[in-house]
Amino acid sequence: ALADGRDYCATGSVVESPSRDRLAYTVDFSGDEIYELRVRDISAGGSGGSCSGSGTASPSGTGNDIDDDDKEVPSNDHRIEGLEVDGTVVWGSDDTTLYYLRLDAQHRPYQVWRHVIGTDPKEHDVMIFEELD
């Protein structure tokens, strides 16, 4: 389970791709409402990205299927490295394009970015909208 070995785990968005072969989801492991963006291949019967099955905070358990550097990563799960997002994710019209919101210094969503799965977000993601104060 996603929450295994964690003190805290809450999911934000959990959204199927247009073909229903992939699941994009956001997860917060700190309680600070800063989420990681992840994608899971569900075409082979993989389960969704819920901490406790209800999408709410969950106490930790034990196990080794957590997507950490020192843990084994499930073969059907992919963490998009280097992104801290607000918890919202939306699919584009295909199974490779995602849109997400980045946070400002006050942790408010202010930029919409496009990510193509399989690319480095630091080099290839494109900001498509910015709301300035």
Image (spheres, rainbow, N blue to C red):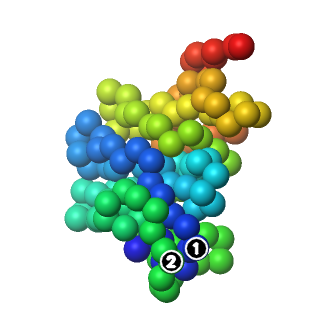
Of label 1 and label 2, which has the lower sequence position? 1
Amino acid at circle 1: Asp
1 and 2 marks in contact (CB < 8 Å):
yes
Question: What residue is rendered at 36% in x and 47% in y?
Answer: 14
Residue 9 drawn at (x, y percent): 51, 64
Residue occupying the far right of the picture = 105
**Residue 126 in view:** no
Mark 1 nearby-residue class (10 Å; few <14, some 14–19, many ≥20): some
Tag shown at residue 129: none
Amino acid residing under circle 2: Ser
Left or right, 97 with respect to 79, comes to left
Asked whether, in this view, residue 20 is left or right of residue 54, the answer is left
Q: How many marks?
A: 2
In the picture, the quarter occupied by the N terminus is bottom left
Decide: is 132 above or below 43.
Answer: above
Relative image position of residue 64 (x, y in whole percent)? 50, 82
- On the image, the x and y values in percent for residue 27 come to 50, 54
Q: Is residue 56 left or right of residue 18?
A: right
Residue 54 falls left or right of residue 7: left
- Determine which residue is flagged by label 1: 7
Residue 68 higher or lower than 125, as above or below: below
Helix, strand or loop at label 1? It is: loop
Identity of the residue drawn at 34% across and 38% down: 95
Residue occupying image coordinates x 55% and y 55%: 28
Depth check: give the residue in front, 111 or 53: 53
For the C terminus, give its image quadrant.
top right
Mark 2 nearby-residue class (10 Å; few <14, some 14–19, many ≥20): some
Q: Which mark is residue 60?
A: 2
Alpha carbon distance from label 1 to label 2: 5 Å
**Position above or below: 65 against 99:** below
